[in-house]
Amino acid sequence: MLRRPSRRAQVPAVALALIFLLPQPALAHAMLESSAPTGGATVEGSPSSVVVTFTEPITNQSTLELRDAGGTVVGTGGVDPSDATRLRLATPDLQPGAYEARVVWFSTDGHGPDRATFAFTVAPAPAPTPSPTPSPTVDATATPSAAPTESGEPSPTLAPSPSPDPGPGDDAAATDVVIPIVAAVILLGALGGYLLRRRSAGA
Ligand SMILES: [Cu+2]
C-alpha cells in the first residue's frame, strides 16, 4: 500500500520547485568558448600569449598550462585580471614545434574541475621582408619633361619697340632748317650788295 505523503513533507517540495523555476544566470557553469591560437592552428613565429575564453566567469583556481612536444611544461597561466571569463598565459619565446595547452577550470556555480586540451604548431617565423627598393620612376618621368614646349618664334614682348619719346630730335631738325635759311639770307645779301656796287660803279 502506498503511503500518502504527509502534509508536512509537501511544503519543502513546493519550495524546492520554486527555487528551480527562478531564473539563475549566475549559477550557469562556464564552458570553453574559444582559444587563441585555436586548436589545430599553425602559427608563424612564437605567439606572445595563449588565451582561452569561456562563456561565463571562472574561478581563480582555474589554470592553463602549455607543454612542448616532449611533455615539458614551458609556461603556466591563470585567470586574466581584467577579464574573469579568460585564462591567459604569457608565452616564452617558443621554438618551432608542436605544443599542447591543458586547461582546467572551475565555474562560479561550483562546477569543476572541467578539463580540456588543444594543440597548435609553431612554424618558423617568416624571413624578414627586404626593405622596399625605390621604384624606377625616374625613367618614366624624364622623357616627357625634356620635350621643348616653346616655338622658335621670338616672343613679342622681347622685340625692341621704337621709343615714342621725341627727345632732342625736333630741336635739331629745327636748327637744321634755320641755319641754311640764315646762310641763304646772308649769301643773298652779300650777292645783292655786290650787284649794287657793280651797278653804281658801272653808272
Ligand atoms: Cu553549472
Image (cartoon, rainbow, N blue to C red):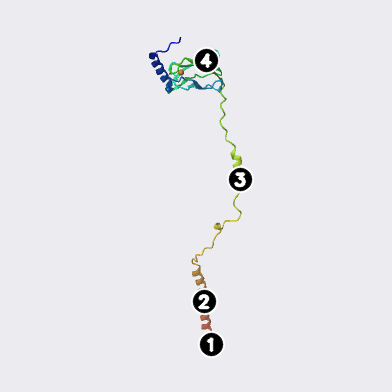
Q: Which residue is mark 1?
A: 199
Amino acid of disc 3: Pro
Q: Relative to 43, say whether 190 is above or below.
A: below
In this view of the protein, which residue sits in the foreground, 34 or 40? 34
The residue positioned farthest toward the bottom in the image shown: 203
> Upstream in the sequence, badge 2 or badge 4?
4
Q: Is residue 21 shown to the viewer in this render? A: yes
Q: Earlier in the sequence, mark 1 or mark 3?
A: 3
The residues tagged by marks 2 and 3 sit, at their Cα atoms, a distance apart of 70 Å
Q: Which residue is mark 3?
A: 144
Circle 2 residue: 181
Q: Is residue 86 left or right of residue 138?
A: left
Comparing labels 2 and 1, the label whose residue is closer to the camera: 2
Helix, strand or loop status at disc 2: helix
Q: Earlier in the sequence, mark 2 or mark 1?
A: 2
Residue 52 vertical placement versus 161 (above, below): above
Which residue was labeled with disc 4?
Answer: 67
Tag 3: Cα neighbours inside 10 Å, few (<14), some, or many (≥20)? few
Please state the horizontal and vertical placement of residue 30, each as a whole percent of the image: 47, 20
Label 2: how many Cα within 10 Å (few below 14, some 14–19, many 20+): few
Kindly report the distance in space between the C-alpha atoms of the residues bearing marks 1 and 4: 156 Å
Find out whether the residues at labels 2 and 1 contact each other: C-beta distance under 8 Å: no
Of the two numbered discs 1 and 3 in the rendering, the one whose residue sits closer to the viewer: 3
